[in-house]
Image (cartoon, rainbow, N blue to C red):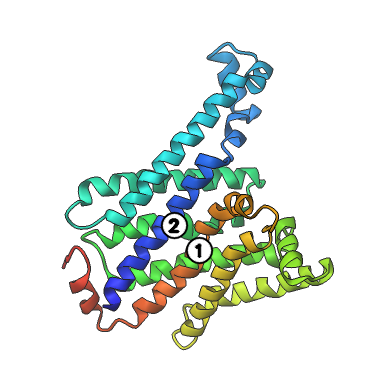
């Protein structure tokens, strides 16, 4: 029973990531202009290959419409990947993994664009490790090379990278994001100074968790903390920005940020569930498909 629940939770996590990004791309925006409007990279191509002045290219409505269309197409691809992540099993593996692979690669590209947008902060990339990593973990689960111990270790590594990178921002190694401070102030009613102190402590705890999940005697407590903190930081996006005068608009504007961040808390829960499964062979026999 626990093994079936673990499979469903893994699929749910990948679904939430894809559907959250699909919602973002279909209804809001994504940072693709950080590439398509990069003068140092594209100006030689635009002016040399297409013989179009750079200023005309970046101010063209047609250019912006093309970028926006591309964003919507990506939203559709993420939607297909979300559906495939729920339906994937040993009988439809050949076709169901294709949207997941495409969606996973797209998530990596999206993360690279967000990193570029944030002045190439390394932590910006690895803060999204769970989000771009889980689709490939799901595919590994259905591969013939599946091994539970390696599977659990991979999940732990993704958790560690995500929390440690998040901690670098909260701790102040990088400039503390204003939205972090604003959320603490809005939810907890702290002053700006106290909010920064709160984030500093949260950052230290993120560092500790990233290490302690690999310590057998401490991993249980660390994972429970990661589960709780991951869910709280996900729902904080709506709580901090919810207005009773515009309830539907508040949810509509921030629900995608909650959806693709929920796996930050659910992935530690998945590891907790898997660590209770003994022996390993029991999980391997009950998983879909059953490979040896």
Residue occupying the point 61% across, 63% down: 166
| Residue furthest out toward the bottom | 217
Asked if residue 212 can be seen in this view, the reply is: no
Q: Mark 1 points at which residue?
A: 262
Image x and y of residue 49, in percent: 53, 14
- Quadrant for the N terminus in the image: bottom left
Q: Mark 2 points at which residue?
A: 16
Asked if residue 45 can be seen in this view, the reply is: yes
**Residue 214 vs residue 85, the one in the foreground:** 85
Q: SS for tag 1?
A: loop
Image x and y of residue 269, in percent: 44, 74
Q: SS for tag 2?
A: helix
Residue occupying the point 40% across, 72% down: 270
The label number, if any, that marks residue 270 in the structure image:
none
Does the CB distance between marks 2 and 1 fall below 8 Å?
A: yes
Is residue 70 positioned above or below 273 on the image?
above
Is residue 269 positioned above or below 64 on the image?
below
């Amino acid at each position: 029973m626990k093994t079936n629940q673990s499979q469903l939770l893994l699929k749910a996590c990948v679904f939430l990531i894809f559907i959250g990004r699909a919602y973002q791309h279909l209804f809001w925006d994504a940072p693709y202009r950080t590439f398509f409007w990069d003068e140092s990279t594209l100006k030689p191509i635009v002016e040399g290959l297409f013989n179009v002045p750079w200023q005309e290219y970046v101010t063209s409505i047609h250019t912006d419409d093309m970028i926006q269309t591309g964003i919507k197409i990506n939203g559709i691809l993420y939607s297909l990947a979300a559906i495939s992540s729920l339906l994937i099993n040993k009988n439809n593996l050949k076709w169901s993994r294709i949207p997941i692979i495409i969606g996973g690669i797209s998530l990596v590209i999206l993360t690279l664009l967000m990193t570029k947008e944030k002045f190439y902060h390394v932590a910006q990339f690895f803060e999204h490790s769970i989000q771009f990593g889980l689709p490939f973990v799901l595919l590994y689960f259905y591969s013939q090379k599946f091994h539970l111990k390696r599977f659990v270790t991979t999940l732990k590594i993704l958790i560690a990278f995500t929390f440690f990178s998040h901690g670098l921002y909260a701790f102040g190694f990088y400039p503390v994001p204003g939205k972090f401070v604003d959320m603490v102030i809005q939810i907890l009613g702290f002053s700006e100074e106290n909010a920064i102190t709160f984030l500093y402590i949260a950052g230290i705890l993120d560092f500790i968790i990233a290490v302690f999940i690999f310590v057998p005697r401490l991993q249980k407590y660390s994972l429970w903390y990661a589960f709780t903190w991951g869910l709280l930081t996900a729902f904080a996006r709506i709580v901090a920005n919810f207005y009773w005068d515009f309830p539907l608009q508040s949810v509509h504007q921030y629900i995608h940020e909650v959806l693709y961040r929920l796996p930050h808390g659910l992935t530690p829960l998945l590891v907790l569930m898997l660590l209770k499964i003994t022996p390993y062979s029991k999980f391997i026999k009950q998983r879909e498909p059953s490979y040896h």
